[in-house]
Amino acid sequence: MQENSYDCIIIGAGPGGLQAAIHLARYNRKVILLDHGGGRTRHALHIENYLGLDLTSGKELVDTGIRQITSFGAEFRREDVASVRVENEFVVTTEKGRYQAPYAIVSAGVVEHPPKIKGMNRFFSRTVFTCVDCDGYRTTGKKLVILGDSLEALRLAFAMRQMFTPDIMLILPDGVLPEDHADLLAEEGIGFLAGTPQEFLGETMLRGLRLTDGQEIACQAVMLSYEYTVNDSCLAGLALAREGNGRELATDPACETSVKNLFALGALKAGKAQAIIAAGQGAMVGIEINRRLLNL
């Protein structure tokens, strides 16, 4: 096997990619994991719904995973993947090198695109959240504002009302909410404003939100509902089937994409994007790739 030739190349140090690397490395397979240092999991301050873990941060989870994979013999390199091609094997190119392997896993996650709101960094992942499955519980009984740019935020408001808190204000850009939908919100006791958020208010504790027209809305927590981009630009040269809105990769039950021996995990594939789900997918894919490598 050549120096830059591996059994499997993994792109992205999310829970899925790390777990796949753990399994493959423990089968004594030659594995390299390439990661550019971003990823949504790393930025999570609180992970509370992961079996066996007390309150931990995404950074702690990822850093522990990197230590684990290297302890079992996998390579980890901080490199940004530019392209993935299929020749006889997968050829992965970064700004620093070129790697090849018969199997590849993509677990690079997504990038969220909330609007630029003053004070966001002060409260993000503390009292300003983006994932109802991850952090909805943390809004229980609180005065909640939901910010969004589409009717997905409306559906989120109804769900939050059922599960976590009756005290909700939905804020959307002017013209997004049809007039008849305002009546539906009123029936559920959900407030609504058309406006543009400008600034989160408070020093150490969130106390409210100011709109560009000067209105101030008191709140204790905020849930964001905005568009996101899947980190799959490196796959642009591959003819990959997609699902739903064309954003997520279509996969079979084994997480294999329409390109044979290329697997997608976590938020890159259709389905729920949770750290613990991605880790389970990574374990499954690691076992499956090893089975194929055995060729028994």
Image (tube, rainbow, N blue to C red):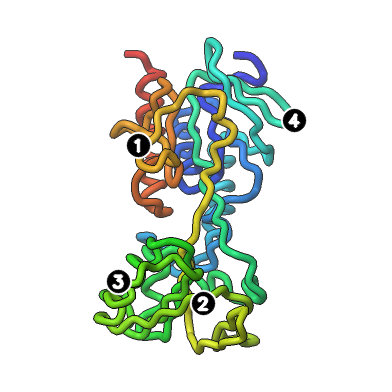
Please give the name of the residue rendered at 24% of the width and 81% of the height, measured from the top-left corner: 187
Task: Please name the residue that numbered disc 2 is placed on.
Answer: 127
Disc 4 is placed on an element classified as loop
Mark 1 nearby-residue class (10 Å; few <14, some 14–19, many ≥20): some
- Of the image marks 4 and 2, the number of the one nearer the N terminus: 4
- Of the image marks 4 and 3, the number of the one nearer the N terminus: 4
User: Which numbered tag is attached to residue 284?
Assistant: 1
- Tell me the CA gap for discs 1 and 3: 46 Å
User: Which numbered tag is attached to residue 180?
Assistant: 3
Disc 2 is placed on an element classified as loop
- Of the image marks 4 and 1, the number of the one nearer the N terminus: 4
Please give the name of the residue rendered at 51% of the width and 87% of the height, measured from the top-left corner: 217
Horizontal arrangement in the rendering, residue 83 relative to residue 260 (left or right): right
* Amino acid at pointer 4: Lys
- Up the image or down, 187 lies above or below 106; here it is below
* Amino acid at pointer 3: Asp
Task: Please name the residue that numbered disc 4 is placed on.
Answer: 96
